[in-house]
Image (spheres, rainbow, N blue to C red):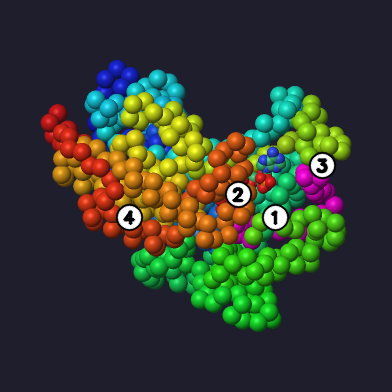
Amino acid sequence: MTKAANGVQAAGERRFDVVIVGAGFSGLYMLHKLRGLGFSVHACEAGSDVGGTWFWNRYPGARCDVESMQYSYSFDEALQQDWHWSERFATQPEILSYINHVADRFDLRRDISLDTRIETAAYDEAAAEWVLTTQEGTRIVARFCIMATGCLSAARIPDFPGMADYRGRIFHTGHWPHEGVDFGGLSVGVIGTGSSAIQAIPPVAAQAGHLTVFQRTPNFSVPARNWAMTEAYEQSWKRDYAALRRRAREETRSGTIYEFSDKGAFAVDAETRRREYERRWQAGGANFMHAYNDILIDKAANDTAADFVRGKIRETVANPQTAEALLPHDHPLGAKRICVDTDYYETFNRDNVTLVDVRREPIERLTPAGLRTGERDYAFDAVVFATGFDAMTGALDAIAISGRGGATLKEAWSAGPRTYLGLMSAGFPNLFTVTGPGSPSVLSNVIVSIEQHVDWIADCLAHLRKHGIGTIEPEQTAQDDWVAHVNEVAHRTLYPQANSWYMGANVPGKTRIFMPYIGGVNVYRQLCAEVAAEGYRGFRLVGAPALQTGQERHAAL
Ligand code: N01
């Protein structure tokens, strides 16, 4: 309730053309873009500062597995030229300082309310407005509501019995204390072996007196082989940044430039394949996945890469029993998000690290001292839950969203998320999601996907304003067709074969359906552009009083 210039202010109520929920990478760029177009716009952020996922995920070892030269905004040439990344893969603190730099550089903070959690968002059909309420009861009213809430922001702790009994400290990687945690000499348990755990385990093991890792499903991980940024590498990007960014956006499926192969795995002989896998393994990073173009489509091709990685795990881990336990067998390589690590497998050679296979020895409950498995009791000073997120839908479910006729988004999506192009959902006019389910989002360099969504939504709102259109909403048939298409494309690949969070399989009771769109950011971008060019094909646009822009309102005042 600070600046009247932000919008008309009644007691406990604020009004804007557009309200954005979230001030991570999506929310910040959305705010910048819409403000530039003259909309009155405000962002509400639950955290005490900007940054979204990079604000919350401060666990030791957290860093991005997309190269820093690519995992950054492309919308401003001066920004991308000025910013210097210090490593091949940026650490969480460096990414967070970049996000803060962006917020300051574009003077975004004046239109962001921090520590402001949105609890409800209800569509008022008569007024054609969204009414949001914060945890403190402030009403925020806006014609358009944009959910920039992130796909991996609803942290999940499994519902083990005895949670309240445990007397040690409990952490979740996705809600890490800002002051950091000193594990020096402590006995620590880590539950989970996904990307977060695989990054956290080596630095925690280096500090802890003893670390016990509870693994339910072994994951495939490839070495990052991070290095300090070199002037030559930085300049190889900066010299031609605009063209390289365009290539990532328009010519790649993942929004990231890798060394893509145009060959299938069986187009070459076994020794050539081995050498190629070895070369990519030594170079590090998720580029490994692109050694052959059928690794995520053909199980036999996938097996060649998976066998190679299993061989590396056996070579690295000294204890043969531990090595066997670490071998992933239950899903194709990459069908769960590939992990990228620094010394993960090597960490199991330390004397102070023990691996517990939770499938053989299930966790039964937490106890005052630690936890109890089917076989024994463990005592810990601290337990780290690296147990992931209610992905893609969790952050939206956490807000009571109701659309036409009071129907809730939760009900509308009870059999899995239903969207048109991952942008909007039928029955919820003027409500947009950035990188929501049904869009490439988590299968891509998410910043590329964010920028595409933000640009598309901003163009759409400008179009509505220009033509005096009050509401936009997907047609049911267009949405049904899109949902079917998203599923159909997913099932042409190996992805649905894994019990992954992409499928909602990590949350008990969640409908199993492949949530992101796997068709590729290049194809998807083209599709979204065509839809807009054809007068927003598949959307119902209904006239209403034209929007009053922020600028016009100020002039009127
Ligand atoms: O979460 P996850 P995450 N008992 O869901 C286990 C991104 N990310 O935070 O596989 C025992 O992958 C669970 O076991 P299982 C990235 O997109 C990116 O690690 O369900 N174990 C699994 O091992 C990533 O994919 C970066 O059998 C239980 C783990 O907890 C996504 O975030 C870094 C359990 C959860 O793994 C999520 O990664 C970090 C239970 N009851 C994250 N419940 C980079 O950019 C769950 N588990 C590098």
- Segment colored magenta: 333-360
Callout 3: helix, strand or loop?
A: loop
Against 526, residue 161 (above or below) is above
- Mark 4 vs 2, N-terminal side: 2
Instruction: Name the image quarter holding the N terminus.
Output: top left
Residue 526, numbered circle: none
Residue 60 percent coordinates (x, y): 64, 47
- The verdict on label 2 being within 8 Å of ligand 1 is yes
Compute the Cα span from label 3 to label 2. 21 Å
Residue 528, numbered circle: 4
Q: Which residue is mark 3?
A: 361
Q: Which residue is mark 1?
A: 330
Q: Nearer the viewer, residue 532 or 167?
A: 532
Compute the Cα span from label 4 to label 2. 27 Å
- Mark 2 vs 1, N-terminal side: 1
Q: Nearer the viewer, residue 509 or 447?
A: 509
Q: Quadrant of residue 279?
A: bottom right
Marks 3,1: beta carbons within 8 A: no
Local packing at callout 2 (Cα closer than 10 Å; few below 14, some 14-19, many 20+) is some
- Mark 3 vs 4, N-terminal side: 3
Q: Which residue is mark 2?
A: 500
Compute the Cα span from label 3 to label 1. 18 Å
Instruction: Name the image quarter holding the C terminus.
Output: top left
Marks 3,4: beta carbons within 8 A: no
